[in-house]
Image: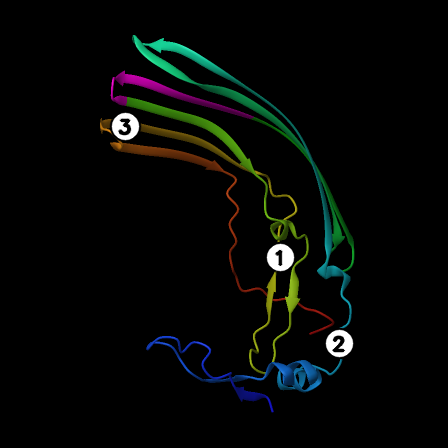
Amino acid sequence: GFGSPAPDGLFSSNKFGASNWAGGNADFQRDNPDTIRGIFGLPAGDPAYNPTETFNDIERTYAIYGQANYETEIGGKPTTGLFGVGVVKTDQTLEGLSGDFSEVEDEQEQTDILPSLSARVQLEENLLLRLAASRSVTRPNFADLNPVTTLVSGTTTNPVGTGSGGNPDLDSVISDNLDLSIENYFAPSSYVALTGFYRRIDGYVQSFAAQETHVVNGV
């Protein structure tokens, strides 16, 4: 009863669609979990609760922003734009259990100053130069801060165990951004533009994989 054909005609609305195929029976999998677990070499019953597979991350952010318009001339060319700045303070408390059930607690405090500037310079009647510069900040994803390496034992179908974990000491990702464009409005509702951008990113979060040996309960 594990396998059954999928309902006929699910994706047969065009000549490239498949009218029918064999697959796992969802009802059988739902009603026979112990049988399914046996296929993968796992004991019957629900897995035991593992407190190391959960953690709490409390993050409080306080921010203040200001922005102003300006109008001036640069080299005799009319220039308008915006200038702004934001100050963001982040308090973070992370709590969890490591693989040996010892407590993990990490507290971080961070203050970021985030300026921004935009300018539009009218070089000629139909020729504009635009500039935008800013700094932005991005917090790591929740899962990236996981303080525990979670291990998954191998099964009969995949004998090699796997694991994953994060780093509670990750800093925010800081990006300095610069955009520059020149635009020629050569006809009504028509223009041609050349645009370039530059990004300098500090603290980029990257995951990687490596083979490791872990001894759990003597195995």
What residue does disc 1 label?
165
* Residue at (25, 22) in percent of width and height: 127
* Residue 46: mark: 2
With 39 as the anchor, is 18 left or right in this view? left
Query: Is residue 189 visible in the rendered structure shown here?
Result: yes
User: Callout 2, which amino acid?
Assistant: Asp
* Residue 151: mark: none
Q: How many residues crowd around disc 1 within 10 Å: few (fewer than 14), some, or many (20 or more)?
A: some
* Residue at (78, 55) in percent of width and height: 102
Measured Cα–Cα span from mark 2 to mark 3: 64 Å
Which residue is outermost to the bottom?
1
Callout 2 secondary element: loop
Mark closer to the chain start, 1 or 2: 2
User: Callout 3, which amino acid?
Assistant: Glu
Q: How many residues crowd around disc 2 within 10 Å: few (fewer than 14), some, or many (20 or more)?
A: few
Q: How many residues crowd around disc 3 within 10 Å: few (fewer than 14), some, or many (20 or more)?
A: some
With 41 as the anchor, is 207 left or right in this view? left
Residue 145: image location, x then y, percent: 64, 49
What residue does disc 3 label?
183
Labels 2 & 3 near each other (Cβ < 8 A)? no
- The magenta-colored residue range is 114-127
Measured Cα–Cα span from mark 1 to mark 2: 23 Å
Q: Is label 1 or label 2 in front?
A: 2
Residue 158: image location, x then y, percent: 56, 78
Magenta span contains residue 122: yes
